[in-house]
Image: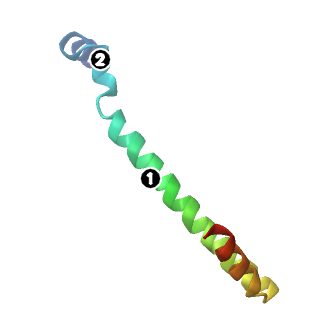
Amino acid sequence: TLDAIGKMIQHEGFGGFYKGMNTKIVQSVLAAAILFMVKEELVKVARVLVTGNVGLVEKVKTRTS
């Protein structure tokens, strides 16, 4: 493995280790955003199920609009 690392540095430079990082960062950010959105919606639904108060959801909708 040290030989492969040496050849990689020799042929592609040190930046060769980070070639695919841009795509992975974008993928991670999008996944985190989607998970956060889903979590927030699940919390709203759970709050309505536990309290039985649908008015809470309506308040949240009008506040964000």
Against 4, residue 45 (above or below) is below
Asked if residue 20 lies left or right of residue 41, the reply is: left
Q: Position of residue 25 (x, y in %)?
A: 41, 40
Pick the front one: 61 or 40:
61
- Residue 59 percent across, percent down from the top left: 73, 77
Direction from residue 7 to residue 33 in the image, left or right = right
**Amino acid found under the numbered disc labelled 1:** Leu
Residue 51 screen position, x and y as percent: 81, 85
Which quadrant would the C terminus be assigned to in this image?
Answer: bottom right
Amino acid type, callout 2: Ile
Frontmost residue, 38 versus 9: 38
Q: Looking at the rendered structure, which numbered label has been put on residue 30?
A: 1
Could you say which disc has been placed on residue 5 in the image?
A: 2
* Relative horizontal placement of residue 49, taking residue 15 as reference (left or right): right
Viewer-closest of 60 and 29:
60
Quadrant hosting residue 48: bottom right
Residue 1 can be seen in this image: no
Q: Quadrant of residue 52?
A: bottom right
Query: Which is more toward the observer, 47 or 24?
Result: 47
Q: Is residue 25 visible to us here?
A: yes
Measure how far apart labels 1 and 2 are at the Cα level: 31 Å
